[in-house]
């Protein structure tokens, strides 16, 4: 199984998995016969490295805040919380809450974790026989003017035919104004909500929107790795049915579903999970290394590249953490350092790792921040 396929599976797992205590890394290690000790609760484990500011993260379907070397619980585990993001100005957080196997909704919380508002209403008729009544929302991001971007899975085929529906989770990117009530009716009728990208069906679609100060947008597009109708050049070594991820800029709505924006990375790099530094001059991302002429099935690299928003171009891809399964990078508030997720040696659990002066080459070796946890795969949030 290629890493791109695993990343796609991660998207589906975020939608379908019942136990949010099982992070992405535990899925990747599911073929192992080695028994590992259960992960600790975040508030009961020692922190190996104190970081400046506060890092918000998801673990086991709960939300937590790491300040210095102390972890505080914001929302209890087992509730399906994931994908926290900061509201500009530090007024609070947005986070997705998943009702496993059925739907997810977007909420606004204050920085202490108190729910302030439910921003979407995706629950239809929650029964196993009518899954098409429910919807999925993921990857919230807030841009200039309180513009809210998110990935949404409507349309999703013929909802009256289970052969075509409804776990075909092909997410497209939509936008609205923060505070607008989001539900399927509003999405279908463009009632204050507009579509910004068009998913490639049966690939996972478009995710990880990053709004630019100029009003543009960076996002990730999943494509078939060996299908010329989607990828300009098939990826060498890719197996039939594999997908690759490509980071793009400024998606253009198109009634025929052909708007795909301008590529920033190449299909063969298989890059995803972009994070933009505060002054929009550097992008951190996760890319697949090529091993023996084919995309690696067991590694993913933390990569940093310079970015020019005016021209929509990236500099060279500098791989600063290799030989691991890196995921979900996040910049420090001053845009110099990075945190990201990667397995811990010995048990494969996702932990938080830190790289100082990530744009200075060669980058310093990453240092482990947490241990004995099993963090969810969503990116953390780092505030002053």
Image (tube, grey):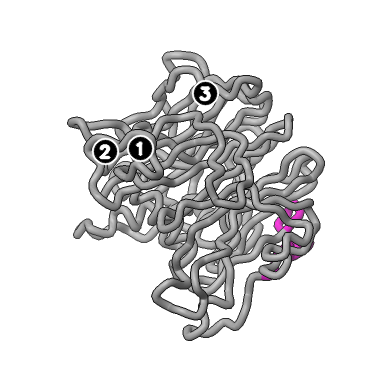
Q: Nearer the viewer, mark 3 or mark 2?
A: 2
The residue nearer to you, when weighing 17 against 309, is 309
Region of the chain picked out in magenta, as a range? 108-121
Quarter of the figure with residue 343: top left
User: What x and y, as percent, mark residue 254?
Assistant: 61, 47
User: Tag 3 or tag 1, which sits nearer the N-term?
Assistant: 1
On residue 356, the disc is 3
Q: Is mark 2 on a helix, strand or loop?
A: loop
Q: How crowded is mark 1: few (under 14 residues within 10 Å), some or many (20 or more)?
A: many
Q: In this view, does 365 lie above or below 97?
A: above
Q: Which residue is drawn at 49% across and 64% down?
A: 15
Query: What is the distance, in whole Å, between disc 1 and disc 3 at their CAs?
Result: 20 Å
Q: Residue at x 40, y 38 (%)?
A: 326
User: What x and y, as percent, mark residue 261?
Assistant: 56, 37
Is residue 170 visible in the rendered image? The answer is yes
Residue denoted by label 1: 300
Q: Does the magenta stretch include residue 187?
A: no
The residue nearer to you, when weighing 15 against 253, is 253
Query: What is the distance, in whole Å, between disc 1 and disc 2 at their CAs?
Result: 8 Å
Query: What is the distance, in whole Å, between disc 3 and disc 2 at their CAs?
Result: 26 Å
Q: Does the magenta stretch include residue 120?
A: yes
Residue denoted by label 2: 296
């Amino acid at each position: 199984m290629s890493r791109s396929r695993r990343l796609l599976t991660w998207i589906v797992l975020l939608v379908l998995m019942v136990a949010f205590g099982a992070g992405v890394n535990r899925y990747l290690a599911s073929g192992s016969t080695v028994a590992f000790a259960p992960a600790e609760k975040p508030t009961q484990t020692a922190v190996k490295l104190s970081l400046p500011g506060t890092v918000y993260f998801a673990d086991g379907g709960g939300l937590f805040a790491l300040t210095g070397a102390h972890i505080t619980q914001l929302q209890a585990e087992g509730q399906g919380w994931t994908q926290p993001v900061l509201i500009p100005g530090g007024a609070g957080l947005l986070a997705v809450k998943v009702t496993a196997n059925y739907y997810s909704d977007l909420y606004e919380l204050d920085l202490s974790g108190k729910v302030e508002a439910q921003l979407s209403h995706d629950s239809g008729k929650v029964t196993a026989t009518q899954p098409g009544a429910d919807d999925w929302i993921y990857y919230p991001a807030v841009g200039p003017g309180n513009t809210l971007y998110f990935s949404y899975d409507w349309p999703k085929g013929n909802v009256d035919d289970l052969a075509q529906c409804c776990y075909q989770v092909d997410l497209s990117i939509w936008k609205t104004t923060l505070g607008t009530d989001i539900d399927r009716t509003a999405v279908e009728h463009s009632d204050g909500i507009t579509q910004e990208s068009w998913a490639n069906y049966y690939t996972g679609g478009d995710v990880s929107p990053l709004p630019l100060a100029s009003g543009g947008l960076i996002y990730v597009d999943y494509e078939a790795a060996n299908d010329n109708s989607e990828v300009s050049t098939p990826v060498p070594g890719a197996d039939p049915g594999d997908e690759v991820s490509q980071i793009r800029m400024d998606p253009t709505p198109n009634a025929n579903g052909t708007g795909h924006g301008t590529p920033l990375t190449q299909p063969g790099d298989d890059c995803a999970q972009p994070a933009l530094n505060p002054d929009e001059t550097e992008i951190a991302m996760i890319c697949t290394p090529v091993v023996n002429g084919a995309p690696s099935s067991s590694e993913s690299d933390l990569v940093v590249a310079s970015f020019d928003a005016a021209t929509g171009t990236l500099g060279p891809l500098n791989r600063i953490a290799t030989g691991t399964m890196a995921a979900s990078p996040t910049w420090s508030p001053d845009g110099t350092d990075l945190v990201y997720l990667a397995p811990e040696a010995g048990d494969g659990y996702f932990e938080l790792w830190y790289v100082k002066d990530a744009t200075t080459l060669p980058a310093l070796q990453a240092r482990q921040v947490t241990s004995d946890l099993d963090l969810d795969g969503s990116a953390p949030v780092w505030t002053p």
